[in-house]
Image (spheres, grey):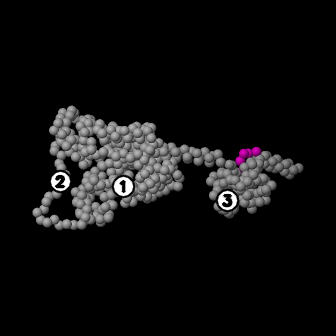
Amino acid sequence: MAFTEMSNESDALKKRYELILTSIGEGVYGLDKNGLTTFVNPAAERMTGWLEEDLIGKIVHEFHHHSHEDGRHYPVHTCPVYQTVKDGVQREVDNEVFWRKDGSQFPVEYIATAIEHEGEIVGAVIVFKDISERKRSERELKSALRQVEELKEQLQAENRYLMDEIQSQHNYAKVIGQGPALDQIHTQIEHVAPTDSSVLIQGESGTGKELIARSIHGASRRRDRPLVKVNCGAIAPNLVESELFGHEKGAFTGAVKQRIGRFELADGGTIFLDEVGELPLDIQVKLLRVLQEGEFERLGSSETLHVDVRVIAATNRNMADMLEQGEFRNDLYYRLSVFPIQAPSLRQRKEDIPLLVEHILNALNLRLAKNFTHISPAALQQLCDYDWPGNIRELQNVIERAAIVCTPPILDVAPIPSAPKKRRNSHAAVLVTLKEAEANHIKEALRQTGGMIAGKQGAAELLDLPPSTLRSKMKKLGVSA
């Protein structure tokens, strides 16, 4: 009688446990000591599509756990569930998938716990749940955090550009002048600014090509978005692609983090490619694609990015010669020069010198904390008579030097030295080849600048050459810095 009561209590307890396992929302499998399925609850059937009758007495791994997420075979002896059956160690997993009967998969989190009786492993129970929603939320959160990080980086980059603009010495708020040459420039700016057409500004160094670009951007519908300036001649050839299009972390040695390129930063705005003639040919191909398709990839990435950027380019080089010599792509040239503008030299617009002097002097009064009211008539006449090979940049330098040493209110300007003339030698000159003469000239420039090639007071500036052109000539002539 006592045995019958114990048996009834055992059956009741067993039914109670089975009722609990049947009612819970997690999937449950029971395995015997050989790893064969002994129990499948309804939740497991709903999640996998495999019914209890399909699995009882069989190795459940071969039905829903046979492959990894990427489709690679998942051997049963490496499965944590069956390792638990062997060694009794509980295992928790949250980075695998189960396969449904229809061939689809879902991410799971499961716990495999051994069942022991009198110190012997007699089976295991697996409790699992579908974590698709959690994984989806994690992906969305990661995506959102990545977008926040990219926006943060873009904002920081835009702030850097803004600080550069604030700290840079732009001496004009607009193109100054009233002569015929400037009238034509003003008219061209009015015509092209409202459009999205590419503009190519050509002219000598110091003629204000960047100012023309800023005027175009300022009068365009993009004026509330960034104007991003890139000096193509000041970037090392191996860094040009990264600078323009960005790079992914690990794309090359030293790429310790992702970087947004200038084109991505200029999205919705304007990019000003100064000294565009210095771009390497392989980068010219990528630039052509941006102009044609509005798309590119960061260095080290296969993801295609799309941008809406207006391109304004400038150069002081003779583009016709570059095209003829194969140094610049014809197709890119025609894409850039949809609307060409020729910036006049200062000697072509001497009637504007009085206005320019007044404007420069007002700016210097603020910067140098002085109070010059006007320039002396003799000094102004000297400025108007000079030919200004360095154009407006040279005019600025001459006036600033005078403002530093003069006492207000009247500015006077020291005589402007002419270009040094070669001294005649009483003896017959020893002729050398043109190649040797060019090499000697570059060596002398390097000697005077202490071997510095680029930057202010560098050999490139002294020789009035872009740094990349000077480096190319040095390599060709065998001249070392």
Residue type (three-letter) at the residue carrying disc 3: Ser
Image height check: is 26 above or below 60? above
Of pointers 1 and 3, the one earlier in the residue sequence: 3
Give 8 or 130, whichever is nearer the viewer.
130
- Residue 112 in the image, given as x and y percentages of width and height: 68, 54
Alpha carbon of mark 1 to alpha carbon of mark 3: how far?
A: 63 Å
Residue kind at label 1, given as amino acid type: Ala
Q: CA distance from mark 1 to mark 2?
A: 31 Å
Instruction: Answer with the quarter of the image where residue 224 lies.
Output: top left
Q: Are marks 1 and 2 in contact (CB under 8 Å)?
A: no
Q: Quadrant of the C terminus?
A: bottom left
Of callouts 1 and 2, which one flags the residue occurring earlier in the amino acid sequence?
Answer: 1
Q: Is residue 26 magenta?
A: yes
Q: Is residue 183 magenta?
A: no
The number of discs equals: 3
Compared to 344, does 35 lie above or below? below
Q: Which residue lies under the disc numbered 3?
A: 67
Residue 87 shows up from this direction: no
Magenta stretch, main secondary structure class: loop
**Label 2: which residue?**
420
Q: Kindly report which numbered mark, 2 or 3, lies closer to the viewer in this rendering.
A: 2
Residue type at mark 2 is Pro
- State the residue position of label 1: 320
Part of the protein shown in magenta: 23-27
